[in-house]
Image: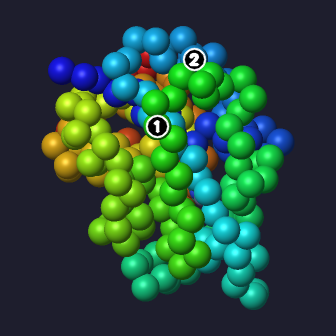
């Protein structure tokens, strides 16, 4: 049985100095590099937004980053502009062993819809194609690492568990944004669907 390492959004904008910096976001890079050779499949995700993406507060006059608005698919946190396609902020952290990736999956490229999960966009029905890729490669077990624990890692892990994969999140190789208790909420909802949480 093939186990895949899914490396979520280890991009400059989520690291210190970036537009949506996650505290300690860069600290996980060497641990992830060390894990890569242990896996039969290696998938990296890349948050990849057009400059006028609807998840950006800049697109909503009078709104500030971290405010929540209603989108047709539900509540949406408004973010600072980040991971704009082709920019340095959207590039992977320079220390990450990107050459080890079998597949790089980009998400959040549709202007009107955000995509936290590596499997489905935030409407919870538009697929990214990752499920088919993993199944056709015979992958049944996933380990998730990366940024941010409470957003893209969380939603990817919950979707993967619901799709029937055996999922572990290695919290030692993740870092969180932690907006108003979002980390605790994420840990609770991951546990509730059977995601295993480890520290290394
Ligand atoms: C993410 C907020 C907005 C993430 C992406 O990678 O967790 N968070 N876009
Ligand atoms: Zn984003």
Residue located 26% across and 48% down the image? 132
Circle 2 SS class: helix
Evaluate whether residue 176 shows in this view: no
Packing grade of label 2 (10 A; few <14, some 14-19, many >=20) is some
Location of residue 143 (image quadrant): top left
- Between 116 and 90, the residue placed more toward the observer is 90
x, y percent for residue 194: 20, 38
Query: Residue at 63% of width from left, 16% of height from top?
Result: 30
* Residue under numbered circle 1: 103
- For label 1, being within 8 Å of ligand 1 is answered no
Q: Position of residue 112 (x, y in %)?
A: 54, 79
Q: Is residue 45 left or right of residue 144?
A: right
Q: Residue 69 location in percent, x, y?
A: 55, 80
142 lies left or right of 193:
right
139 or 165, nearer to the observer: 139
Quadrant of residue 166 within the rendered picture: top left
Question: Can you say which quadrant of the picture contains the N terminus?
Answer: top left
| 151 relative to 143, above or below | below
Position of 14 relative to 97 (above/below):
below
Q: Is residue 107 above or below residue 171?
A: below
Location of residue 65 in the rendering, given as x and y in whole percent from the top left corner: 71, 68
- Residue drawn at the location 54% of the way across and 62% of the way down: 108
Q: What is the CA distance from the residue labelled 1 to the residue labelled 2?
A: 16 Å
Pick the front one: 74 or 51: 51
Residue at 48%, 82% in the rendered image: 71
Residue position marked by numbered label 2 in the rendering: 33
Could you say whether the residue bearing mark 1 is in a helix, strand or loop? strand
Figure quadrant of residue 134: top left
In this picture the colour scheme is rainbow
């Amino acid at each position: 049985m093939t186990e895949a390492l899914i490396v979520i959004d280890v991009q400059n904008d989520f690291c210190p100095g970036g537009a949506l910096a996650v505290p300690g976001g860069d600290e996980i890079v060497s641990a992830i590099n060390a894990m890569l050779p242990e896996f039969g499949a290696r998938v990296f995700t890349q948050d990849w937004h057009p400059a006028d993406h609807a998840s950006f507060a800049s697109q909503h006059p009078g709104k500030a980053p971290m405010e929540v608005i209603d989108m047709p698919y539900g509540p949406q946190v408004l973010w600072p502009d980040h991971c704009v396609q082709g920019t340095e902020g959207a590039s992977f952290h320079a220390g990450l062993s990107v050459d080890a990736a079998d597949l790089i999956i980009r998400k959040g490229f549709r202007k009107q819809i955000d995509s936290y999960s590596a499997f489905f966009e935030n409407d919870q029905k538009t697929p990214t194609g990752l499920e088919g890729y993993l199944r056709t490669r015979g992958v049944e077990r996933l380990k998730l690492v990366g940024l941010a624990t409470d957003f893209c890692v969380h939603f990817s892990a919950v979707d993967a568990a619901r799709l029937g994969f055996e999922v572990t999140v290695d919290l030692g190789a993740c870092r969180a944004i932690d907006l108003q208790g979002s980390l605790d909420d994420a840990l609770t909802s991951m546990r509730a669907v059977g995601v295993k949480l480890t520290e290394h």
